Image (spheres, rainbow, N blue to C red):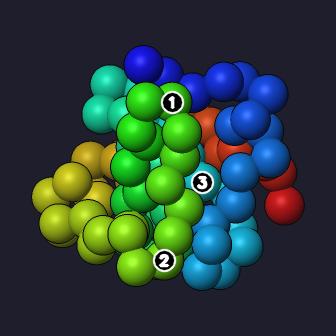
Amino acid sequence: MGLDPALSEILACPQDKGPLYFVAEQDLLYNPRLGRTYSIDNGIPVLLIDEGSDADPATAAALDARIASGELSPTFEQ
C-alpha cells in the first residue's frame, strides 16, 4: 500500500529516536543503527518497540548497501 510522503518525513525510530529508511517493496521501515525493522500495515507504520524485529544479517547488509548507494533516503536528516 505504501506510505504517505508527508508522514514519512516525520517518522522516527521509537527506540533511538533517529531516522528510519522506507523500503517500499517490502512495506517496512529500517533502522540501520540498530538493525531493526518495523512493518507497515495498510499504510500505517507499526512503530512499537515490541513489534519491531531484528533484521537478519543478509537483509541488513543488503539494506545498508542500498543506503550507502543513496538508493534509500532517511525519513529526516539529523
**Mark 1, residue position:** 43
- Which one is closest to the eye, mark 1 or mark 3? 1
Tell me the crowding category of disc 1: few under 14, some 14 to 19, or many 20 or more residues within 10 angstroms, Cα based: few
- Could you tell me which quadrant the N terminus lies in? top left
What residue do we see at 51% from left, 30% from top?
Answer: 43
Q: Nearer the viewer, residue 73 or 27?
A: 27
Q: Earlier in the sequence, mark 2 or mark 3?
A: 3
Q: Is residue 71 visible?
A: no
**Mark 2, residue position:** 49
Q: Nearer the viewer, residue 51 or 77?
A: 51
**Residue 40 image-quadrant placement:** top left
- Label 1 to label 2, Cα distance in Å? 18 Å
Question: Whole-percent x and y of residue 29?
Answer: 47, 48
What's the mark number on residue 1? Answer: none
**Mark 3, residue position:** 20
- Could you tell me which quadrant the C terminus lies in? bottom right
Amino acid type at image mark 3: Leu
**Residue 12 image-quadrant placement:** bottom right
